[in-house]
Amino acid sequence: MAHELTNARIRYLIALWELDPEGRGIRSIALARKLNVSRPSVHAMIERLTDSGFVNKEHYGIIYLSAKGLKAAEHYKSRIGSRF
């Protein structure tokens, strides 16, 4: 898998995958609550993941995994389970 994925990025991808199993998208506040982090922290990480092609973000705030992000989330979730 991609070398650009830190533990924190993997944690966000898995959380996004768990919150949005149908791929319809979620708001950052849902991700912040699930991960128990601030909204600014979510915003900063989503920007990084968007720049890396793992996440897509609509201009009105909905975020969802890209095909690359979905593949990575499934890959890591199957290997680490609930470690995060």
Image (cartoon, rainbow, N blue to C red):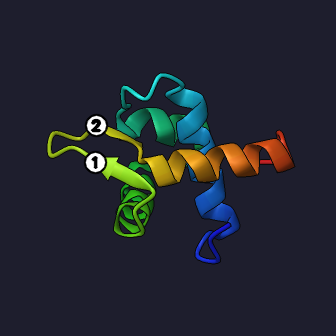
Identify residue type, mark 2.
Ile
Would you name the residue on which mark 2 appears? 62
Q: Secondary structure at mark 2?
A: loop
Q: Quadrant of residue 81?
A: top right
What's the residue at 65%, 52% (across, down)? 11
- Where residue 14 sits, quadrant-wise, is top right
Q: State the residue at coordinates (46%, 47%).
A: 67
In what quadrant of the picture does the N terminus appear?
A: bottom right
Q: Is residue 54 above or below residue 21?
A: below
Q: Residue furthest bottom?
A: 3
Mark 1 or mark 2: which comes first in sequence?
1
Q: Residue tagged by mark 1? A: 57
Q: Is 72 drawn above or below residue 60 in the view shown?
A: below
Relative to 48, is 73 on the left or the right? right
Q: Tell me what residue is drawn at x 54 percent, y 28 percent.
A: 19
Mark 1 touches mark 2? (CB < 8 Å):
yes
- Give the residue at x 64% y 57%: 10
Question: Residue flagged by tag 1: what amino acid is it?
Answer: Lys
The single residue placed furthest to the top in the displayed view is: 22
Foreground of the two, 43 or 62: 62
Q: Taking 46 as reference, is 81 left or right?
A: right
Q: Position of residue 48 (x, y in %)?
A: 41, 68
Name the outermost residue toward the left. 59
Q: How many numbered marks appear?
A: 2
Rounded to the nearest angstrom, the CA distance separating label 1 from label 2 is 6 Å
Q: Position of residue 68 (x, y in %)?
A: 49, 54
